[in-house]
Image: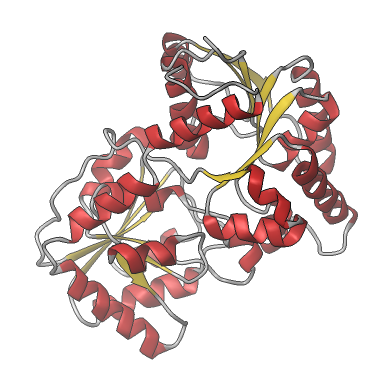
Amino acid sequence: MDLPPLTYLTFDEVGRGVGASQIVPYVERFAQRGLEVILHTFEQREPSTSLRRRLEGAGVDWRAHRFGGAGSRGAARRVAVGAWLLRGARLAHARSDLAAAAAMIAGAHRWVWDVRSFWIDQRIALGMTQPGSFEERVGRRIERAAARRSSAITVLSVAGAERLAERHGSGLRDKTIVVSTCVDLDAFPLTPLPPPERIVLLLSGTFNALYDRALTFRFVDAVTALRPVSLQFVRPEPSPWDADVVSRGGTCSAADFAEMPYRVSTAHAGVVLLTGRSVAATVAAMPTKVAEFLASGRPIVTTPKVGDVEALIKEYRCGVVVASATDDALTAAARELIALLADTELPARCREAATTHFDLDRGVDALLRTYRRIMGIADGPGP
């Protein structure tokens, strides 16, 4: 093995959400390629025995820690613990800004800053941080320092990489690579569209304040005005959106990540409409559900300036962009979706977009090349 052990630090839990869909597949693949992985996570609930066995079987050294309290004090404690855990790490992967802060405090030898979004901008957009507050100033300082001190940077979108360079200097382009949201193409196979008599629209996963609740249901109503619609909402737990779904005759159900490939296969399209209230909060993002829909051959309905989604839709004709919140724009988007679903080549184009941009194995390859580069190791067959 030409790489030293990788210490992967995240403050996300890995039993569900992005932990299950993004972190676990990556570290499993790293271990399968022969890379020794030490995974540190911070869990809000007791980790499942089955997940422990899965990661152990894959050869991942998973060390789960207690998440602890909320708020700034809880975050500061996690950063301190994370810095202690990274002491002496020769190669580290810091997922998001607080993990980056821990890497800097620890003085990690070589480390990757994994920019999942512009973290402090997202917190402001979600109402979790007040503009101009002490917390915002600290967040901005962490971002500036991570941009300067990290050995390499990964971002989810080309648009995010450009915004990062605008903020912190064009020199960052030399150490920044795009490794987008991943999807296991074997887990999410291409499947035929359901029968066309009733259009099945799917809302999947969690929906925070960045998602436009009003616009989402207005779009559903616009499609319903033209064609019979079945609305499905699949989420990990009850949501404030449930009432809107039920009032339209839709169904709400819980599902874990393992069930999602089947749930996606029962739909015609996925709806992913964000508010646009903070371009900084969404331009670097790439919702996991986008990759899962496309991999399954399902188009997406989205809003402008969500990562690189708009560009993908233009290139592959694999979805619809709702241009504005006007009634005319919603009707136009509904008509465009109906026409798109009649295109027999649509599922193949969606799959091609996912294969080219979101394939898990391509992401693993890109990260392994990055690890080798920052360690000064010539790229080769390796793990």
Q: Nearer the viewer, residue 262 or 350?
A: 350
Residue 381 visible in image: yes
In the visual, does 150 lie left or right of 41?
A: right
254, 376: nearer the viewer:
376
> For this view, does 162 lie left or right of residue 78?
left
Quadrant containing the C terminus is: top left
Can see residue 256? Answer: no
Residue drawn where x is 18% and y is 75% of the image: 339
Q: Residue at position x 45%, y 36% from top? A: 363
Q: Is residue 226 above or below residue 105?
A: below
Q: What is the quadrant of residue 330 in the picture?
A: bottom left
Depth check, front residue: 276 or 145: 145
- Rendering quarter of residue 99: top right
Residue 90 is situated, as x and y percent measured from the top left of the image, at 71, 17
Q: Is residue 92 above or below residue 134?
A: above
As drawn, the residue found furthest toward the front would be 378
Q: Position of residue 31 (x, y in %)?
A: 47, 16
Identify the residue at horizontal 60%, vertical 46% (top origin).
Answer: 116
Vertically, is 121 above or below 227? above
In the picture as drawn, the residue positioned furthest to the bottom comes out as 328
Q: Position of residue 49 (x, y in %)?
A: 47, 14
Question: Compared with residue 202, is residue 365 higher up or lower down, i.e. above or below?
Answer: above
Most distant residue in the right direction: 134
**How many labels were placed on the picture?**
0
**Colouring rule applied to residues:** secondary structure
Residue 196 in the figure: left or right of residue 278: left
